[in-house]
Amino acid sequence: MKKNTLKKLAASVLACTMLVTFAGCGGGSSDSSQGSAASASAESSGDVKTVAIVQQMDNPAFDDMREGLIEELEAKGYGEDKVKIEYQNAQGDASNLNTIVQNLVQEEVDVLAPIATPAAQACVAAGSDIPVFFTSVSDPVAAGIISDMEKPDKNATGTSNAIPVEDIFALMEKLTPDVKTVGIVYNTSEDNAVSTVESAKAYLEENGYTVEESVVTNSSEVQQACQNLFPNVDAVFIPNSAMVQSAMALVADIAAEYKLPTYASSAATVETGAMATVAMSDKEIGAATADMIIQYLEGTAVEDIPSVVFPASDTVLNEDYIAEIGITFPDGATDGATFVQTTAE
């Protein structure tokens, strides 16, 4: 009798233990399921989009464009709660640039936002269904990024900073009317720079100037190119060549030895050493691209967002460089200009 009682008691304890264990496991599974569902629901309701900004290399102008893009997104209500910014820099390496783009495509980011021509070309060449919103591409059609500015194709659109060579050289004529020979330094592998140089040479030659050029294929060649070219010219033009712009402090040091006025294609390049330019605001062109991204995020198809040529309107002069080479300008030549000081790169 005692044995039966003990057996019944043991069975009862075991049943209770199993019930408690099962309830504990069942409760854990239920909580986990509810937590996952809640997490997924929160992620869905948040609907955070990833905008991947791709730069070919470090460059003051590119950095300003990136900052302008991010600041505009935030100002228009697209902060961290709605947009995640992923920033990638290829550090001037073309193969690295392609790898970065391929990885972003595999990550399935929501928007590719390349800055300047090489990065934009890499993003479009990837052939993904991720929309591309480029910033500061001098000639998107010639670069093969899109076929039509008004009705962009290839799932890409963005802002163009067509360099106003006529305005820049009109400024050169006003500030330094004795210039006869203009030297140009650029990287031949950058389509944007090549396009600008062709326009510059056509304008200069048509207006009676002599053009001397020195080309580079990597950053280590910039110093020698300048040293070879600068003794033979009266002024220097630095086009939108990222490789040369990134070495502007070095270029300016060499140009100063020969007391050469240096004209550039961006305000940021003047801030890092060149003497003068007529250019657009780099932050504003980045902001204009951000506005296009917002249009897309709010439902407008990429092909319905025309690519825009951003106008140049600001005359910018570097007072430090002007003082260093001891140049004086004709009366009234600098009226309306903005004066900046050299900043560290």
Image (tube, rainbow, N blue to C red):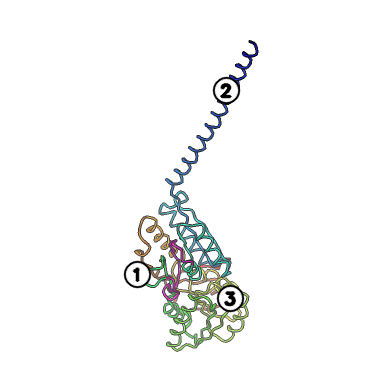
Check if residue 128 falls in the magenta segment.
Answer: yes
Per the image, label 1 sits on a secondary structure element best described as: loop
Give the vertical position of 266 relative to 174 (above or below).
Answer: above
Residue assigned mark 1: 150
Whether tag 1 and tag 2 are in contact, CB under 8 A, the answer is no
Residue assigned mark 2: 15
Residue type marked 3:
Val
Residue type marked 2:
Ala
Residue assigned mark 3: 251
Which of the two marks, 1 or 2, is nearer to us in this view? 2
Q: Earlier in the sequence, mark 2 or mark 3?
A: 2
SS assignment for the magenta stretch, majority: loop
Per the image, label 2 sits on a secondary structure element best described as: helix
Farthest-out residue, right: 3
Identify the magenta region: 126-145
Query: How many numbered circles does the render carry?
Result: 3
Check if residue 146 falls in the magenta segment.
Answer: no
